[in-house]
Image (cartoon, grey):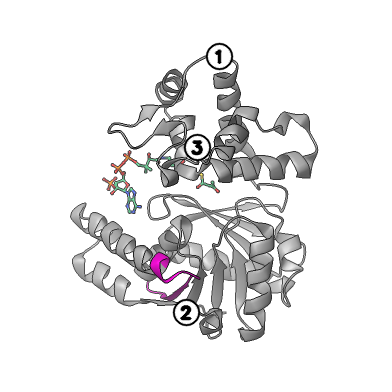
Amino acid sequence: MSINKVGVIGAGQMGNGIAHVLALAGYDVILNDIDRGALDDALTLIESNLARQVSREKITSDQAEQALNRITTTLKLSDLGKTDLVIEAATEKEAVKAAIFEDLVPHLEPHTILTSNTSSISITRLASRTDRPEKFMGFHFMNPVPVMQLVELIRGIATDEATYQALKDVVDRLGKTSATAEDFPAFIVNRILMPMINEAVYTLYEGVGSVASIDSAMKLGTNHPMGPFELADFIGLDTCLAIMNVLHDGLADTKYRPCPLLTKYVEAGWLGRKTDRGFYDYREDPPVPTR
Ligand code: CAA
């Protein structure tokens, strides 16, 4: 199964990173979003992230230019009809993803592989909303996509071997490493990472430490590049809460109970870096802890 042209749905944090690495690896990419402004912003960000890689001598300016030329954008899902692979990286809401698949599927060629970059939603359930569960998989990139080595590959119950192999080959061509996970809530990375972040919020909630002391303890005490609050703000607190809810609902174990303080931050609209405020206030430089 030869993959040359790839459609990416969603030009946000994950979608633009995925388009970036695919184009750099020589794939023709068509990036789709419902918002023209989001597409323009994504292209600007990809250009500056490519320039950053040129300045650090990771790639040449020719490679950066060619990568940018391989990316086209569209507001129409139907323009993704002629692709060999589609990666859905829209917002982490099951109803949104299901509606996208419903609109997209009638336009697709029979051979097109369909994937979701979901960080926690059941692949088997998403696949069942399409006409091709055997050609459907979870294809989970980590943020920031151009830097992180890992891609999780998640087979649904019906996924066939050819689809799995084709995606494994794409990961190899990207120069990244795959880890295969079974289709259970939050797969591997988020099954382990989110309870750690949630526990950090409980540690704060119970007054064991402040945002700064907990982050510094975990950074210096366990050699994590970011403390749990820095990382939660980077991922987005709404995403962290959504994943905790998937774990809590899907595994029905109280150990996954989202911390009420995490819920409160999300209710306040303090979602992390993307809203300029989360566990840190990013309107100040350097950012100031909010507790
Ligand atoms: N595009 C291209 N390159 C980028 C980049 C981007 N968006 N962001 C950073 N870089 C590059 C920099 O150019 C730099 O390259 P060199 O090593 O060649 O110099 C390198 O990454 C490090 O960047 P910085 O020096 O600017 O910053 P840093 O040293 O503080 O590292 C970081 C930043 C890579 C984000 C690091 O803090 C880190 O690894 N943090 C943890 C990230 C993490 O855990 N991600 C997973 C989140 S979980 C997830 O994504 C799953 C989910 O479903 C929620």
**Residue indicated by mark 1:** 207
Q: Nearer the viewer, residue 139 or 1?
A: 139
Residue 13 visible (yes or no)? yes
Image side of residue 268 versus residue 173, left or right: right
Find the residue positioned furthest to the top: 208
Rendered position, 155 above or below 278: below
Could you tell me the amino acid type at mark 2?
Answer: Lys
- Number of callouts: 3
User: Looking at the image, is 5 positioned above or below residue 19?
Assistant: below
Q: Are marks 3 and 2 in contact (CB under 8 Å)?
A: no
The amino acid at mark 3 is Ala
Q: Secondary structure at mark 3?
A: helix
Residue at mark 3: C-beta within 8 A of ligand 1: no
Asked if disc 1 and disc 3 are in contact, CB closer than 8 Å, the reply is no
**Label 3, label 2: how far apart the Cα atoms are:** 33 Å
Work out whether mark 2 precedes mark 1 in sequence or the reverse, and give the earlier one.
2
Element under label 2? strand
Amino acid type at mark 1: Gly
Q: CA distance from mark 2 to mark 1?
A: 52 Å
- Residue 226 shows in this picture: no
Residue range in magenta is 26-38
Labels 2 & 1 near each other (Cβ < 8 A): no
Q: Nearer the viewer, mark 1 or mark 3?
A: 1
Could you say which quadrant of the image residue 128 lies in? bottom right
Quickly name the residue at label 2. Answer: 5
Which labelled disc corresponds to residue 78?
none
Residue at image coords 54%, 40%: 237
Image point 44% across, 26% down: which residue?
Answer: 290
Residue 232's tag is 3
Residue drawn at x 44%, y 66% as measured from the top left: 173
